[in-house]
Amino acid sequence: MFYFFISSKIILTIAASYLISQTSPWLVPIFLLFIAIDLIDSKVMGSDYRPYDSFFDRTFAYVCFFTFLIISPAVYPAIIYIASFAVRDFFLAGLIQNTKNYSARSNFLDRGTMLITAIFFSLQAGGIVPLDSPNVSLFCFLLAGLILCQGIDKAQRVKRVDRANRVDRVKKALG
């Protein structure tokens, strides 16, 4: 199963990158398939698989983002939420690395934010939603705010789990 999920994510990453370079509306089903596989693999593989899952999820996202930024004639306003996503990941990765806490579970805000971002990005990169208009710009700013709020919420949960783990270690050491 491990190899199935990883190879599926690699193949879908390549397919998504190609479809982004072609501005193809077929990008949306690839994103939906990736999301479905991601949901299934997180349930089937469990928490020991989480670092691999996160790595290949981020690889998919950043390959798609960079492909879009390279081929897209209009980078603004999408760069706003792409940059927010990168900033969020940078700080969360640092926090997770410092706490060594890879077990903070995703909640509805995490999943909802990533789903909205993925669908909107695939619609933009697939040429279904215009790259730039006043409404698109406004939505990009709102999406960036949502991504940053989700990152703050996730950081608080990582810290909370880290504190609980430290308390448990102290109790075991004393007890």
Image (cartoon, rainbow, N blue to C red):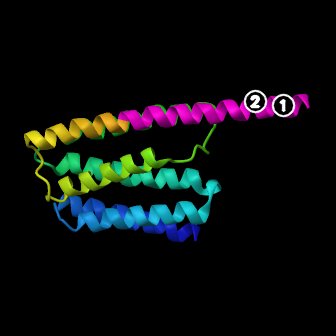
Instruction: Name the residue located 18 percent from the left edge and 53 percent from the top edge.
Output: 124
**Residue type pointed to by label 2:** Val
Pick out the residue farthest to the front.
108
Question: If the image is split into quadrants, where does the N terminus sit?
Answer: bottom right
Q: Nearer the viewer, residue 1 or 11?
A: 1
Contact, mark 2 vs mark 1 (Cβ under 8 Å): yes
The image position of residue 25, as x and y in percent, is 18, 65
Inspect the image, locate mark 1, and give the three-letter code of the amino acid beneath it.
Lys
**What is the C-alpha distance between the residues marked 2 and 1?**
6 Å
Instruction: Check if residue 159 falls in the magenta segment.
Output: yes
**Which quadrant is home to the C terminus?**
top right
Residue 137 is tagged as none
**Numbered badge on residue 167:** 2
Q: From this viewpoint, is residue 76 visible? A: no
Tell me the magenta residue range: 148-175
The residue to which callout 1 is attached is 171
18 in relation to 84, above or below: below
Residue 155 among those drawn in magenta: yes
Q: Position of residue 130 (x, y in %)?
A: 10, 51
Residue 102: image quadrant is top right
How many neighbours does mark 1 have within 10 angstroms: few (below 14), some (14-19), or many (20 or more)?
Answer: few
Q: Indicate the secondary structure of the residue bearing disc 2.
A: helix
Residue 4, position as x, y percentages in the image: 52, 71
